Amino acid sequence: MTEKKYSNERNKTSEISDIAFSYGGVSSLSSLELITQLLGGAQAIGRKMNNILEFLALTENGLPVSTLKNLQKRMKFTNRDMGRALEISESTLQRRLKEGKKLDKKESESTIQLASLWAKGLKVFEDENDFRTWLEMKNTALGNNRPIELLHSPIGREEIKEILNRIEWGIYS
C-alpha cells in the first residue's frame, strides 16, 4: 500500500513539475527538482532525489541511458551535439542509446553537469528560447567564444555557470 501511495505521489509531483515546465514556471522549482525533471524525473533516474549530493552515488553506478535521452530531447541537441558535449563520438553515443545500457561514470557526471547548467540557464533567463539564443552568441567574458562551444569541458561548463550567476545577480557579463 505504501509503495502504491508513493507512486501516486510521485506521479502527482511529476505532473505538477511538468505543468510548471510547460508554462514557464521554472522559477517555482528548486534546482534539484529542475535537474531531476530535465533527466526525466524520478522514474527515469530510478529514485527520488532528496539532495544534489545523491547524484554522486548515481554516477558511481551509472545513470540509465534514458536520462541522457530525456536531457538531449529537452536541450534539442542532435546526437552529434550531445556527443560533443559528452566528449564521445557520435557513433558511440548512438550505440549507447540503441543498447539502452547505463552510462559510464564520466558520461553520467557530464550528463548531470549539463542538466545542472541547463537548469541554471532556465532559471536565469526564464525563457528557454532566450537561453538557447544566449548560448549561440559570442561572449566576451568567455574569451569571445559562444557558450555552446564550451559545453564539452567541465571547465567550460563551470565558466558558463559562473557567467549565468553574474547575469542572475545583475553583474555585467
Image (tube, rainbow, N blue to C red):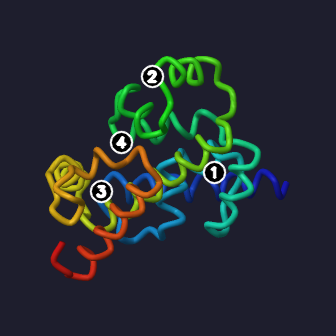
Of the image marks 1 and 2, the number of the one nearer the N terminus: 1
Q: Which residue is mark 4?
A: 75
Q: Which residue is mark 1?
A: 42
* x and y, in percent, of residue 128 in the image: 26, 53
Total marks shown come to 4
Three-letter code for the amino acid on which mark 1 is drawn = Ala
Of the image marks 1 and 3, the number of the one nearer the N terminus: 3
Q: Give the structural element (helix, strand or loop) at label 1.
A: helix
Q: Which residue is mark 3?
A: 23
Q: Give the structural element (helix, strand or loop) at label 3.
A: loop
Q: Are dots 3 and 2 in contact, CB under 8 Å?
A: no
Q: Quadrant of the N terminus?
A: bottom right
Q: CA distance from mark 3 to mark 2?
A: 33 Å
* x and y, in percent, of residue 70 in the image: 49, 38
Three-letter code for the amino acid on which mark 2 is drawn = Glu
Q: CA distance from mark 1 to mark 3?
A: 21 Å
Residue at x 57%, y 56% (from the top left corner): 12
Q: Nearer the viewer, mark 2 or mark 4?
A: 2
User: Against 172, is 85 above or below?
Assistant: above
Residue nearest the viewer, comparing 31 with 143: 143
Q: CA distance from mark 4 to mark 3?
A: 17 Å
Residue nearest the viewer, comparing 13 with 109: 109
Q: CA distance from mark 2 to mark 4?
A: 16 Å
Three-letter code for the amino acid on which mark 3 is drawn = Tyr
Which image quadrant for residue 126? bottom left
Q: Which residue is mark 2?
A: 90
Is 24 left, or right, of 5 in this rendering?
left
Q: Nearer the viewer, mark 1 or mark 3?
A: 1
Estimate how packed mark 2 is, as few (under 14), some (14 to 19) or many (20 or more) residues with alpha carbons within 10 Å. Answer: some
